[in-house]
Amino acid sequence: MRSSVTAFVLAASMVVPAQGSAQGSPQGTPQGTPQGTPQGTAQGTAQGTAQGPPAGGRGGRGAQPPRTPRAAAPVDFTGYWVSVVTEDWRWRMVTPARGDFAGVPLNAAARKIGQAWDPAKDEAEGNHCKAYGAAGIMRVPGRLHITWQDDTTLKIETDQGTQTRLLQFGGKPAAGIKPSWQGYSSANWEGPQRGSNPPDFTPIALNPREGTRGRSLEVVTTNLRAGYLRKNGVPYSENTVLREYFDLSNERNGDTWFVVTTIVEDPTYLTQPFVTSTNFKKQPDATGFSPNVCSVR
């Protein structure tokens, strides 16, 4: 009998706190919490989060200024380079004969101009640099000196023809600017490749490119003065759009190379894009870099 009473008392003692909690929680905790904790926390958290931490501090990545093109460069093109002629000797190492247009997709109008090429006339008119414009200069055998002119401009100086190309990151040509031999070059570091298993090959005209190999720099040049693709008068017009892709590679033997794939699009004189690739090897210093003026012949 005593054990039964004791069990009843224990059971009753367990029930009493439960009733107290049930009565106390609705009146105490729920009422107190909405007025105290949620409002106080919401106001305090919102104010604390909105007003701190300061920009640039912990958790302030969004306030970081964007990196300059120079700082964001995935590869380093600066230094001295020499062209290595592994193709087209007959058109690059010597001035081709008049009418030798092999390999260039010229239309009838362009062929007529090429057949009338007169180097003496170019000299008399002061057009010594017609073969040293942006659409042809990378094919001229010689040496390059590449530096950063500033944080957004990569500069290419050539010893042959003493030309200077400025590759502008994020800029636009000024309105009304006159066409020039080197035109206006807009540059961009190529972004990461798309897709988990990109194809090994895609058409060269695609922009941006895709592929399994490393990519570096793309350049689009417009506002060009009419010039020659080759020294023997193969013409390109002021309507030309020049697209270039610079790919840098470090070889196992320590050599550094870059190849520039050049695509010349000219609706005036070409029946289709004219595509070439040119190789350059990095040099340890300025040895051999010898500026020379443009030559017609």
Image: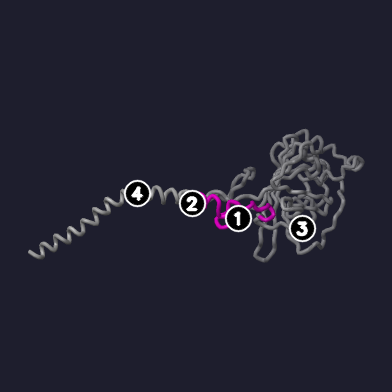
Q: Which amino acid does label 3 sit on?
A: Val
Report which residue position mark 2 lands on.
44
Left/right placement of residue 268 relative to residue 125 reads left
> Residue 24 appears at what percent x and percent y?
29, 52
- Cα distance, mark 1 to mark 4? 39 Å
Q: What residue type is labelled 1?
A: Gly
Q: What residue type is labelled 4?
A: Pro
Most common secondary structure along the magenta stretch: loop
Q: Where does the magenta region start and end?
A: 46-71
Residue 182 in the magenta stretch? The answer is no
- Mark in the foreground, 1 or 4: 4
Q: Earlier in the sequence, mark 3 or mark 1?
A: 1
| Residue occupying image coordinates x 70% and y 63% | 255
In what element is the residue under mark 4? Answer: helix
> Residue 101 appears at what percent x and percent y?
77, 42
Report which residue position mark 1 lands on.
56
| Residue occupying image coordinates x 78% and y 56% | 145
- Mark in the foreground, 2 or 1: 2
**Quarter-wise, where is residue 250 in the image?**
bottom right
Q: Which amino acid does label 2 sit on?
A: Gly
Report which residue position mark 3 lands on.
82
> Residue 239 appears at what percent x and percent y?
75, 36
Left/right placement of residue 169 relative to residue 232 reads left
Other residues around mark 1 within 10 Å, as few (<14) / some (14–19) / many (≥20)? few
| Residue occupying image coordinates x 48% and y 51% | 44
> Residue 56 appears at what percent x and percent y?
60, 55
Residue 275 seen anywhere in this rendered image of the structure: no
Q: Residue lying farthest top?
A: 109
Report which residue position mark 4 lands on.
30
Labels 4 and 2 touching (C-beta < 8 A):
no
In what element is the residue under mark 2? Answer: helix
Q: Earlier in the sequence, mark 3 or mark 4?
A: 4
